[in-house]
Image (cartoon, coloured by chain):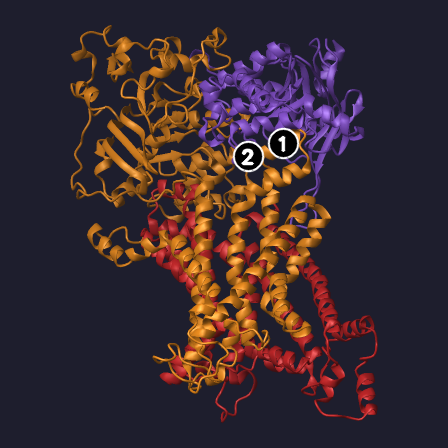
């Protein structure tokens, strides 16, 4: 396996919610004690529901947010200790693709200007070189002929085309790693498939690593090498994508898998049964496993002691669950 | 938790909120006094001269006056002494009118409160009605007329409008008195005189209110238009509610929130407007008092009036915020479930 | 909306009364700029335009307007017209300079607060709060009174009392823009803060800042006027305000002294406000393009049918035939729905699948008769619910249908619930003709059926106190409150997490099995159709392109678009074959004359340049030339003879 490009080392992020109306409120944890290795050429899918902290983790990885605890380690050095030179290298190595392509562009700039800026920042190309580079980028992401797209403004493009330009912008600095935060979810179904194909092709051609942040488990099964499942700011299960998808261990992962819709009318998963259970998701007071309130396996230990990631019965996967760990430990 | 418990919790939260707001406001008031003191310090001219009047006096008398009012001390000492007095409810002594500042202000305050309350409340009520009506109206031209009225209202100098009203209704037509607050022959005093002030109140209140009417109408219109394009209005209509029911149950309350939120701010502006209006109409309020104090360089009175205006604005803001809290369940927020 | 019942004719007459206002409204910018231009020119050329030297003293003091002195003379005998023209210079200079000062201070302080945030922001916001507590007129008054009345001091005093509004605007622009993704992307690319502030934030914050700067000119004029009126203006500079000073005592004898300067001030400020208003309209229209507000539908011209004709084949609960909805968007026409045929039988669960821009949401709005009336260009066809043609009902009758027979569940429960109304009330208000206690009882039943708590405490909650899944179920409960015959669910689970989506879909299915209500589920997600529906329609480019039983649709999709859709679903076996659709959804403002899918279709051939017919195959159907021959001669394959005409008309 490749050496990790980035190491997320025990990252935590808290948001102090000081509201105007209530002077003090408890801290809210967005990310708690997450450690991950991000590797070139590999796709790590980060899965979770809204509010699980997966997007915050993406921003932390990009150093667009500063971690409250822990650090992002790049080149063996934590980023907070990195100098200007290291930082510039970090910016050229790691890039991000956002969910919403309509908000991701300065509306006053043409595609050419948008793509030219990072090229000018990280080098001094001549005017013709610049234009050639931009055309090349546009062609790489499938916007051909490039001449038709150079001089248009973002709002004149379709959603899929904008997403392609966004990918081109990320590629402009020739990164080794891309954080893709829900890159498909604002696109039409048929366009989603096109963009996904593009991302896969780029990975193959350029050996790019991805942190694919998504809520779509079907997608994970298709493209990810590894997967980390997040719940309430913590990673509760991680491992090879196929293993986790086929044999989920953590009760939350199982719930996720069971909730995924089948794409086959002959194998429906939504029956009329099981309507009695209402999720009035219990408040999380920080003590114990944050899934305990919803968990069918929960025991007394789960309410008092926070489970940490540890080996599970499945090879290569880790789970943070007292019950599973004990069961597999006994075997 | 029981309903009653919830309610108690809400009341407690509100009280805590009110106290913390008031404490924050104290800091601001301190700032206000400080700025005033600095300005007075920077002002050219001799306060002693202003105090003793425009005729030559013996130097001993000047010294005595300066000592009496601590005019030779540094401004910081004066400031601290002043704060001490204010904390005890003493706003100082007006040299020009030889009366205590507190007494002077208290005497004049009811008139200003009456004027601004009359102007602001009637303007706000009409403004909300006009704004809501024009937003709900399906005719574009209704809104266009309102927009026009609003801009005209924002463009006319308040005091000039007062002058024109006097010209027309008092001097030409003779329908209403041109100034003052009561008939000179009337005997009534204090709060009782307020009742007799009715006819005297009309013109200044109108002059003061036009701008506030325009402002409230604009905010109410914007808020209502905003609510009308909300998704829950679609829901209401898809439920089969009539237009009238939709407006009554779903539009008015939600549209009232931003309008109410703006009212506290408007109190300050209305008080500022009252300064010129009171001058135009010889209205015996604190606005005219401020004007006279400035002309007479009666500094302690100036600071006193400013302080009172600031307190009035702070109270108005607090009241609107409390009203807002009562009307918008979202910011009570005690029972949040994710 | 209050005039809903009034006949169209009377409304038109009343509207014409104010039509001049509409015309003026659209010309604010022009009128304001021309007025301002004239004013500036008059001020610049005042020495040549003024009939007299403004300081020249004529023999007639307090002279009324006359041929000699057009606007009259003042106390000393100055010609008022000449004074007014010269005063324009002073007033405009003071106002513009003060506005520039305010702009500079506002942008600087707003930027500092918005950029540094935290304690810097807190302190600076306290400073602006200070200016809110002491109104600008009062503060300017004190400043001038204490420091002196030179013109430049007055100008500065005005400038430093009116900046807080600008600062607040700049600050909020900073705070919103810096969270925007394009700014984040610039940071990720390694751009400096300077680049981000000057190249990304300022250009995009320009609109509101410019508008405020314009309005500040008007505010400054009014302040200068008020200061001068109180005798605190510069006595050596005859501004308009200065002209008003002293007019007070002569109001009775010489009204003209006070009138003209006031008119000049009001007109100037009005012109400034016109320009400001036009600017803000312009910036707003650029920033949110194509937002449509939903108001009532057009009044139906034909009288309400006294006895609604029973139409349709009797077996369908919802029978939509030949439904066409075209909407205006600017100068373009959006062909949102074209000749759609949809049938839903009682008790059925039917899907309507399409991507964004397929027209599926406008279809549901059309069925509810809730199209954005101002933008409707064409709205024809027949929509029969239980035999009653909804197109022919008047608003009151349609309201009753929505109240009793037809309900809809929308996508985003947070925005579709009234934030300030208790959820119980929102449910009960959708119920017809029950006593208060019966309503309570019925509400409990409905809450139970959607697996929500039935306690009074729950009913007294507000939407923001509930989780997303609970809110969506409240929306469903609301739709069920009237025991409708047909429930339309428009993207009912799109915004929800997978686990919650599964619960909500389960709830919908459970509710359906307990009643004989029919459901039309509108979605972009084929998986939802696979899980929940019996039959489904597929929509593309405003047209129904396929109708099939769900098992058939998934095992053997007919239309090339449906096949492409299947191949785009991760997890479907077709997905791995990698046969993707190219391009994106057809633009509804610019549809081709032939098959709307042809541009993306691998199997397109020359026949596709004419519009394909609706080919009926048993209970199912497809709109594609590929199937036109298989099922027999054209005459039989189209469901009605009119189809051959359709080809030529479109």
Q: Position of residue A298 (x, y in %)?
A: 67, 24
Q: Residue at x 73, y 49 (%)?
A: C119
Residue at label 1? C186
| Relative depth, front residue between C529 and B56 | B56
Q: Are marks 1 and 2 on the same chain?
A: no
- Indicate the chain on which mark 1 is placed: C
Circles 1 and 2: CB atoms closer than 8 Å: yes
Q: Position of residue B50 (x, y in %)?
A: 71, 84
Question: Split into 4 quadrants, where in the image is the N terminus of chain A?
Answer: top right
Left or right of residue C371: residue B280: right
- Residue A155, relative to residue B31: is it above or below? above
The colour applied to the residues of chain B in this rendering is red
- Indicate the chain on which mark 2 is placed: A
Q: Position of residue C243 (x, y in %)?
A: 50, 76
| Relative depth, front residue between C60 and A97 | C60
Q: Which chain is purple?
A: A
Q: Which chain is orange?
A: C
Left or right of residue C99: residue C314: left
User: Dot 1: what SS?
Assistant: helix
Q: Residue at x 47, y 17 (%)?
A: A144
Residue at label 2? A106
| Relative depth, front residue between B213 and C454 | B213
Q: Position of residue A219 (x, y in %)?
A: 55, 16
Crowding near the residue tagged with mark 2, few <14, some 14–19, many ≥20 C-alpha atoms within 10 Å: many
- Residue B215, relative to residue C391: is it above or below? below
């Amino acid at each position: 396996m490749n050496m990790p490009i980035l190491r997320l080392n025990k990252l935590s992020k808290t948001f102090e919610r000081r509201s105007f109306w209530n002077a003090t409120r408890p801290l809210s944890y967005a990310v708690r004690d997450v450690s991950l290795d991000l590797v070139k050429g590999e796709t790590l899918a980060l899965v979770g529901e809204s509010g699980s902290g997966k997007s915050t983790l993406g921003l932390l990885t990009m150093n667009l947010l500063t971690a409250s605890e822990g650090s992002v380690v790049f080149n063996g050095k934590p980023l907070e200790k990195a100098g200007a030179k290291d930082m510039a290298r970090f910016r050229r190595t790691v890039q991000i693709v956002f969910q919403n392509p309509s908000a991701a562009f300065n509306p006053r700039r043409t595609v050419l200007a948008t793509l030219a800026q990072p090229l000018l920042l990280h080098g001094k190309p001549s005017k013709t070189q610049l234009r050639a580079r931009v055309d090349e980028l546009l062609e790489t992401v499938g916007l051909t002929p490039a001449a038709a797209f150079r001089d248009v403004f973002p709002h004149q493009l379709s959603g899929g085309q904008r997403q392609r330009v966004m990918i081109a912008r990320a590629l402009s600095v020739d990164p080794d790693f891309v954080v893709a935060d829900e890159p498909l979810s604002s696109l039409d179904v048929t366009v989603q498939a096109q963009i996904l194909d593009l991302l896969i092709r780029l990975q193959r051609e350029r050996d790019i690593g991805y942190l694919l942040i998504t809520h779509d488990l079907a997608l994970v099964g298709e493209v990810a090498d590894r997967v980390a499942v997040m719940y309430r700011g913590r990673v509760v299960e991680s491992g090879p994508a196929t293993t986790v998808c086929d044999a989920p261990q953590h009760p939350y992962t199982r719930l996720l898998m069971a909730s995924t819709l089948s794409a086959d009318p002959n194998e429906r998963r939504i029956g009329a049964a099981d309507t009695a259970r209402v999720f009035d998701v219990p408040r999380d007071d920080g003590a114990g496993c944050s899934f305990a309130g919803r968990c069918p396996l929960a025991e007394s230990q789960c309410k008092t002691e926070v489970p940490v990631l540890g080996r599970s019965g499945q090879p290569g996967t880790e789970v943070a669950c007292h019950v599973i760990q004990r069961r597999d430990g006994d075997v | 938790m029981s309903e009653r418990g919830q309610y108690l919790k809400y009341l407690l939260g509100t009280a805590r909120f009110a106290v913390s707001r008031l404490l924050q406001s104290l800091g601001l008031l301190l700032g206000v006094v400080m700025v005033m003191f600095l300005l007075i310090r920077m002002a050219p001219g001799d306060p002693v001269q202003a105090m003793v009047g425009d005729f030559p006096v013996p130097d001993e008398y000047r010294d005595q006056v300066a000592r009496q009012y601590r005019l030779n001390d540094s401004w910081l000492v004066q400031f601290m002494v002043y704060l001490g007095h204010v904390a005890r409810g003493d706003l100082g002594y007006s040299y020009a009118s030889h009366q205590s500042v507190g007494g002077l202000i208290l005497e004049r305050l009811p008139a200003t409160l009456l004027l601004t309350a009359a102007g602001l409340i009637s303007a706000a009520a009409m403004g909300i009605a006009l704004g809501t009506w024009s937003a709900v109206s399906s005719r574009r031209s209704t809104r266009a007329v309102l927009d026009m009225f609003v801009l005209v209202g924002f463009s006319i100098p308040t005091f000039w409008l007062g002058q024109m009203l006097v010209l027309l209704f008092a001097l030409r037509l003779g329908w209403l008195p041109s100034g003052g607050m009561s008939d000179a022959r009337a005997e009534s005093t204090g709060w009782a005189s307020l009742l007799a002030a009715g006819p005297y109140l009309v013109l200044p209140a109108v002059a003061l209110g036009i701008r506030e009417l325009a402002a409230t109408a604009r905010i109410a219109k914007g808020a209502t238009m905003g609510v009308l394009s909300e998704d829950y209005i679609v829901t209401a209509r898809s439920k089969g509610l009539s237009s009238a029911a939709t407006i009554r149950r779903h539009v008015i309350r939600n549209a009232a929130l931003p309008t109410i939120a703006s009212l506290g701010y408007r109190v300050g502006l209305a008080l500022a407007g009252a300064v010129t209006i009171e001058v135009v109409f010889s209205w015996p309020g604190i606005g005219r008092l401020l004007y006279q104090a400035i002309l007479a360089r009666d500094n302690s009175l100036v600071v006193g009036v400013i302080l009172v205006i600031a307190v009035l604005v702070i109270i108005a803001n607090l009241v609107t915020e409390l009203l807002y809290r009562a009307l918008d369940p979202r910011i009570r927020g005690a029972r949040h479930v994710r | 909306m209050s005039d809903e019942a009034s006949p169209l004719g009377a409304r038109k007459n009343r509207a014409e009364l104010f039509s001049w206002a509409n015309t003026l409204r659209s010309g604010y910018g022009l009128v304001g700029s021309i007025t301002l231009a004239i004013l500036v020119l008059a001020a610049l050329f005042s020495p040549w335009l003024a009939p007299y030297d403004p300081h020249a003293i004529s023999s007639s003091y307090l002279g009324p307007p006359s041929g000699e002195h057009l606007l009259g003379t003042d106390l000393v005998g100055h010609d008022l017209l000449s004074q007014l023209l010269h005063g324009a210079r002073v007033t405009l200079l003071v106002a513009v300079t003060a506005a520039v000062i305010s702009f500079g201070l506002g942008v600087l302080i707003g930027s500092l607060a918005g950029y540094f945030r935290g304690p810097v922001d807190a302190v600076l916001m306290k400073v602006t709060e200070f200016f809110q507590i002491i109104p600008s007129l009062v503060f300017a008054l004190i400043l001038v009174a204490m420091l002196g009345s030179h013109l430049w001091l007055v100008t500065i005093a005005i400038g430093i009392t009116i900046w807080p509004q600008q600062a607040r605007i700049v600050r909020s622009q900073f705070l919103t823009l810096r969270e925007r993704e394009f700014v984040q992307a610039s940071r990720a690319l390694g751009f400096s803060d300077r680049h981000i502030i000057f190249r990304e934030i300022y250009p995009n914050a320009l609109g509101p800042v410019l508008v405020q700067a314009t309005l500040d000119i008007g505010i400054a004029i009014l302040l200068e006027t008020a200061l001068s009126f109180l005798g605190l203006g510069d006595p050596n500079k005859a501004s308009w305000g200065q002209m008003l000073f002293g007019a007070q005592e002569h109001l009775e004898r010489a009204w003209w002294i006070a009138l003209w300067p006031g008119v000049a001030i009001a007109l100037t400020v009005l012109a400034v406000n016109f320009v400001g208003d036009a600017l803000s309209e312009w910036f707003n229209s650029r920033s949110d393009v194509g937002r449509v507000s939903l108001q009532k539908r057009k009044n139906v011209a034909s009288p309400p049918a006294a006895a609604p004709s029973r139409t349709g084949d009797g077996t369908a609960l919802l029978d939509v035939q030949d439904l066409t909805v075209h909407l205006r968007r600017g100068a373009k026409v959006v062909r949102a729905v074209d000749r759609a045929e949809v049938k839903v039988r009682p008790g059925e669960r039917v899907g309507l699948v399409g991507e964004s821009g397929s027209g599926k949401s406008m279809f549901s709005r059309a069925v509810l008769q809730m199209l954005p009336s101002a933008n409707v260009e064409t709205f024809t066809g027949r929509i029969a619910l239980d035999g009653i043609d909804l197109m022919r009902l008047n608003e009151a009758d349609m309201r009753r249908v929505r109240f009793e027979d037809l309900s809809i569940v929308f996508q985003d429960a947070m925005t579709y619930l009234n934030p300030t109304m208790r959820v119980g009330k929102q449910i009960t208000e959708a119920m017809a003709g029950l006593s208060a206690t019966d309503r309570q009882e019925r509400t409990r039943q409905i809450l139970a059926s959607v697996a929500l708590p039935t306690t009074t405490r729950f009913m007294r909650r507000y939407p923001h106190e509930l989780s997303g899944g609970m809110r969506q179920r409240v929306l469903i409960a609301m739709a069920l409150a009237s025991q409708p015959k047909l429930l339309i669910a428009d993207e009912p689970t799109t915004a929800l997490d997978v686990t919650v989506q599964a619960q909500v879909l389960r709830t919908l299915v459970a509710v359906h099995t307990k009643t004989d209500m029919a459901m039309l589920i509108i979605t972009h997600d084929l998986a939802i159709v696979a899980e929940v529906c019996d039959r489904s329609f597929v929509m593309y480019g405003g047209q129904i392109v396929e109708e099939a039983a769900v098992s058939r649709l998934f095992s053997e999709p007919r239309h090339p678009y449906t096949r492409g859709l299947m191949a785009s679903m991760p997890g479907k076996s077709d997905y791995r074959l990698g046969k993707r659709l190219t391009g994106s959804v057809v633009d509804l403002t610019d549809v081709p004359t032939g098959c709307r899918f042809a541009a993306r279709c691998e199997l397109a051939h020359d026949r596709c340049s004419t519009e394909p017919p609706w080919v009926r195959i048993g209970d199912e159907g497809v709109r594609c030339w590929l199937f036109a021959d298989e099922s027999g001669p054209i005459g039989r394959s189209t469901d009605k003879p009119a189809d051959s005409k359709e080809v030529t008309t479109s």
